[in-house]
Image (tube, rainbow, N blue to C red):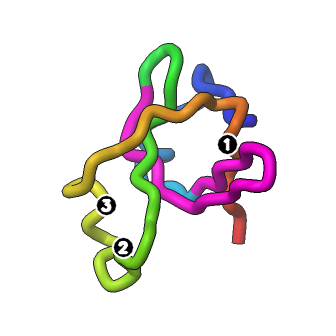
């Protein structure tokens, strides 16, 4: 789970993992509100990883996310 209250500007662009049942997706944080973390999920865009801000972000519940630490 990601704590929205602890997010800062340095977290924009960080990799996260979405966990919901058997579904697991990887994405990057584009922003957040008081209820959702906005994530750009990757499906075949590997050559454009640095351009995540150009793509539509999906509002995601923070309890379904964790940071993808190297």
Circle 2 crowding by C-alpha within 10 Å: few under 14, some 14–19, many from 20: some
The single residue placed furthest to the top in the displayed view is: 34
| Quarter assignment of residue 4 | top right
**Type of secondary structure dominating the magenta stretch:** strand
Q: Position of residue 14 (x, y in %)?
A: 52, 55
Residue at the (35%, 44%) spot, across then down: 57
- Location of mark 3 (residue): 52
6 to the left or right of 56: right
9 to the left or right of 22: left
| Quarter assignment of residue 6 | top right
- Location of mark 1 (residue): 65
The single residue placed furthest to the right in the displayed view is: 21
**Gap between marks 2 and 3, in whole Å?**
6 Å
Kind of element beneath mark 3: helix
Residue in the foreground of this view, choosing between 9 and 47: 47
Q: What stretch is highlighted in magenta?
A: 16-32
**Quadrant showing the C terminus:** bottom right
On screen, 17 above or below 9? below
Q: Do the residues labelled 2 and 3 touch (CB within 8 Å)?
A: yes
Residue 27 lies in magenta, yes or no?
yes
Q: Do the residues labelled 2 and 1 touch (CB within 8 Å)?
A: no
Q: Where is residue 64 in the image (x, y as percent from the top left)?
A: 69, 37
Residue at the (51%, 58%) spot, across then down: 27
Kind of element beneath mark 2: helix
On screen, 53 above or below 64? below
Residue 65 lies in magenta, yes or no?
no
**Gap between marks 1 and 3, in whole Å?**
18 Å
- Location of mark 2 (residue): 49
**Gap between marks 2 and 1, in whole Å?**
19 Å
On screen, 1 above or below 27? above
């Amino acid at each position: 789970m990601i704590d929205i209250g602890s997010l800062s500007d340095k977290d924009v662009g960080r990799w996260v993992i979405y966990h919901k049942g058997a579904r697991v997706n990887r994405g990057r944080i584009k922003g957040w509100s008081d209820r959702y973390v906005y994530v750009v999920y990757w499906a075949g865009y590997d050559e454009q990883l640095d351009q995540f801000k150009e793509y539509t972000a999906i509002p995601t519940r923070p309890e379904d996310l964790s940071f993808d630490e190297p």
